[in-house]
Amino acid sequence: MYTTLLKTPRLLTFLLSLGLISSGANAAGFAIAENSASGIGSAFSTGGAAGEDATTVWANPASMTLISDTQGVIAVHYIAPQADFSNQGSTLATGGAITGPNADGGASAIVPNLCFTTPINEKLFAGISINAPFGLGTVYDDDWVGRYHAVETHLTTVNINPAIAYKLNEQWSFGAGVSLQYVDVTLTSAIDFGSLLGSPQAADGFGDLTADNTDDLSFGWNIGALYEFNKDTRISAAYRSEIEHNVEGDADFSVPTSASIITSTGAFTDTGLTATVSVPASASLSIFHALDEKIDLMADITWTQWSTFEELRIKYDNPSQPDSVTTEDYQDQFRIALGGRYHLDEKIILRTGIAYDQKAVKSAELRTPRIPDNDRTWLSFGLGYAFSETIKADFGYTHLFIADTPINNTFESSQAALNHTLTGEYTSSVDILSAQLIWNF
């Protein structure tokens, strides 16, 4: 019914202080692909088949068997989205025009990740990945034309994923892991109390909902397999489970004095809240082939089960406050990537890649300004440099070309006077800069 959502004001652990609290979705839905600077350089065409470094713990734990040394990786990714909205006739529930300026909802973010892998013996390997696989950040001005749909949205996840791998023979390796996942969410928006009083846009209030799963951390699992045809060609398959988060938090409402008659009924008073936020399952298949001593070719296809994200429902402890419901009705989607590496010499590797990432949102009517998702094309370049046998560095850059994104979304409320419609178009793009340092012990 009433716009708002979730947020955490404190750090969960020291891991959050490293910067994992930042969010900025750039893959379909609210996924964050950034977990490797070497992967960024080839548009993640490496999948789990390349096994370039310890970041493969996340992509496919079975590929840890390709790394003979004990290795640690620390990476940081700067995500700079641009999402300019142009109003094209947004209307109040009563039919009048919604006033307010256009806006850029893009919110830059810094997303780090840590990975570690080590051989236990010739056949058994262990590792851990710490990253932020899902996130979302959009921030608009308080008075923009879509303020009744969204002002601020932040979704943050931290995933801790220990894993093991076993090399069965020269061809087959298998891996498995478990994920401990933390999530917090913030949703804010303006509330048109004026429409409830018969004078639209004359008495705006504000809603701020925050929640996390600190008291009920969520778990998932992942598995993977690697088949090596020979030293030059291998294929990887990996699966990661859906994770369901049960979050708790607070709803804080700012109500203008002129609308106090509404709060006297018990509605729009500060209260606790609960919600269920699920992140989808995914499966990937990737291939690696060394064409010769200089050139490597890679390809990856990843399927994500976004169809499990049917609605966002927020339940309030206050019985006078109806549930807030946003219909999402996402669709499953695919991401296809092709890339290559060129070994310039013993120290320098050049990378490039291209990817097509399908949208998860079905239509302009279901698209919201919180997640203005659409089809996107990745163009990536990267550089790897070996300072020594022990220390290496990787750098990557990606530009995401996003199709013009129409929106024609009607706010869902049990109060008909609040069912305003946001109509317009987004012009969007994303730039990503990544760097990582690799230590071999």
Image (cartoon, helix red, strand yellow):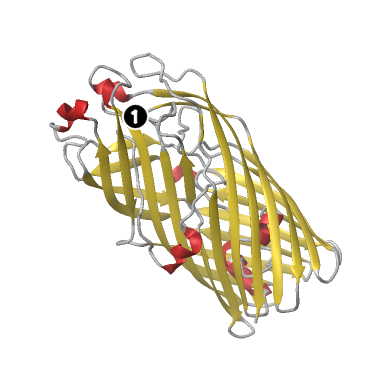
Q: Position of residue 192 (x, y in %)?
A: 31, 26
Query: Does residue 407 appear to the left or right of 377 in the view shown?
Result: left
Q: Position of residue 109 (x, y in %)?
A: 53, 51
Q: Give the quadrant of the N terminus.
A: top left
Badge 1 amino acid: Glu
**Could you tell me which residue is drawn at 75 percent across and 73 percent down?**
387
In the image, residue 145 above or below residue 82: above
Query: Does residue 437 appear to the left or right of 23 in the view shown?
Result: right
**Could you tell me which residue is drawn at 48 percent across and 39 percent down?**
371
Q: Quadrant of residue 384?
A: bottom right
Query: Does residue 383 appear to the left or right of 413 in the view shown?
Result: right
Q: Which residue is mark 1?
A: 412
Q: Nearer the viewer, residue 230 or 429?
A: 429
Q: Single out the residue that lies furthest toward the bottom.
A: 121
Label 1's element? loop
Q: Is residue 416 visible?
A: no
